[in-house]
Image: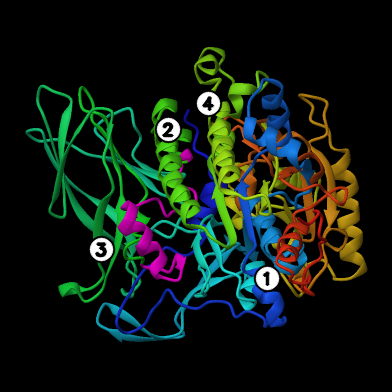
Amino acid sequence: MKKAVEQYREANSRTAISRRGFVKTGVAAIAGGFLSQSSAFAAGPAIISARKKRRVFVLGLDGMSPYMVARLFESGGLPNLKRLSEIGSYSKLATSDPPQSPVAWSCFITGMNPGGHGIFDFVHRDPETIKPYLSTSRLVQPSRTLGAGKWSLPISGGGIVQQRKGRPFWEYMEDEGVSASLFRIPATFPPKETSTRLLSGLGVPDMRGSYGVFTLFTDDPKREPGHVPGGDIRRVQFADDYVATDIAGPDNNLLKVPEPVRIPLVVRRDRLYDVARISIQGTEFILNKGEWSGWVRVKFAMMPAGFAGVSGICRFYLKQVHPVFELYVSPINIDPADPAIPISSPASYSRELCERFGPFYTQGIAEDNQALSNGVLDHEEYLAQAWSVLRERERIFDYELGRFREGFFFHYVSCLDVNQHMLWWTIDPQHPMHRPDLAKKRAGALDEFHAAADAMVGRVLKAAGPEDLVIVMSDHGFASFRRCFGLNDWLLKNGYLKLKPGAGPREADGLRGVDWSETQAYGLGINSLYVNLHGREAGGVVPPGDPARALVAEIVGRLEKETDPATGENPVSRVLPASAAYSGGCIGSAPDAVVCYNRNYRSSWESVLGGFTGQVCSDNMNEWTGDHCMDSRLLAGVLFANRKLTAEAPSLVDLPVTILAEFGIPKPEQMEGRDVLTKS
């Protein structure tokens, strides 16, 4: 396929943490700076003694949906979850508005709604510049630098700062002497240095400061070289079956004009056989066609004579040798043995895991769905990579489960979320990307990933004793993503947004073609609608107060009545003004309204970065065919426990309160939820 998609991961990829954040020097630690945390309350020593004997196991199955549970229960699948529901309880779990992963997991972590923790979308924007950035963390530039020729050396300030507000629930446990182990917990990058054993997950970038940039080296004239969402296509030319090229690493922020650090790569291919020898920084290995390498460690020098450098890891896949050559190189992950930026707490934890298991994926989204979307990996190759991610994490899961003795255990499982995004078309015959013959070949893939997750549940049940609490939960459900809704196209069509003279929707270049003096509202992010507010946006024209509220109310009414002419359906289920959706100290940073899409609809790929498609509704012709950024009422997650529920309609914000209660820790003042399970 191979229509370039400019948004979702691209939004995170290019606007997230600046690519210039990965530098370690003796002068300054650019990758520093963590959010300060609020203080906790104390408890009596007798209670502390009793708490240490308790154990709570939580498996976070990102994206597990009531739909898939019902489907697999009916066919006899998920036997361990079925058993868990019979000995305890099973319920839908209310999710966040919107039900995006960083938003939902932040609710779980803090027990607050987004108005309290401040994460409202994958993508936020600076109101003064309208520039988008990744919501969960930001790069703060050094406040002072020292210039020396072409160099610009930081001497004070700067670093990666976590944007989520609110205290994580495990810190309240830490205050009371309860140990905790959390593997790949989302929305925790960069981690705070604590005694809790924690490895950050969703939100951890690759070495280029993105959500993952692969590279494809090829001499195929049919491949258009250049950047594609989530990757680079590099044209190479062999001479005598030899080619010398390079791999791009992080931008060197020590230069006054930053540019990527590049390391040499040499490839020699056999003239007769489908085999090639890869040489990089003194490491040589041979790959056969269709073979993956193990992890290869690479080093990027930031200054001459090795004064400063950072280490990364990557994998190679030899896709083809003859008649055309294609070599895939994975995104360069942060090296867990020598992380350029903290990815674990304590910092030694990632090194400990690396020493025991060897290098492993550290990137927040490790399954390379962008390579599949861009036709760089086919479905078989993508699935092989996705399974390798899961098997790698299962080894660590079994290790941590085996040594867990007391306190709190959390393990995050990504395989359901990412693979439902990429494979939902196999179970939805009405999706425009459904291919019947290929669907038959891949029909069982999603079931197999669910079976693997269920097997992990079985291992937890085997490890847990009769007094231990076991919870299996998901942050949201899933649905088909058949049709795209161009929010900015709709605003343009209905007169709420104007373009500069000569800038048509296709030439608008995101929001840069917008005439702000004539624009009342704009969309940016997956579910976010903003008013062009006077005094907030640099070009704001809408007066604050009643005029802004009246404008939002008018847009809400019209959006909810919009009909897709191709289907006769309403793409938008409802629109929530921020004042109705949220409460808390961060509500001032919220979008003015949350656009909640109907099942089968989501914002267009172009809309995420403020772009236009030229039409309001269109088919989703990307391999990313399943989604959850819709109306939260339609996308509930799941909650399984080996205890009975004591309350109806449990929600994500109830879980931290419930977990703390198991250790006898009272509900913290910041939290909104309630204890929803019986005690042992």
Quote the CA–CA distance across marks 2 and 4. 12 Å
Can the viewer see residue 165?
no
Image label count: 4
Q: Which numbered mark, 3 or 2, is in the foreground of this view?
A: 2
The C terminus appears in which quarter of the rendering? bottom right
Labels 3 & 4 near each other (Cβ < 8 A): no
* Badge 1 or badge 2: first in the primary sequence: 1
Location of mark 2 (residue): 382
Q: How far across and down, in percent of the image, does residue 272 sit?
A: 10, 22
Q: Counting residues from the N terminus, which is met first, the one under dot 2 or under dot 4? A: 2
Q: Are marks 1 and 2 in contact (CB under 8 Å)?
A: no
The numbered dot on residue 300 is: 3
Mark with earlier residue (3, 2): 3
Q: Position of residue 122 (x, y in %)?
A: 62, 55
- Under circle 4, the secondary element is helix
Spot the residue most to the top.
437
Amino acid found under the numbered disc labelled 3: Phe
- Report the residue marked by disc 1: 50
> For the residues carrying marks 1 and 4, which lies nearer the camera in this image?
1
> Which label number is shown at residue 167?
none
Q: Nearer the viewer, residue 212 or 178?
A: 178
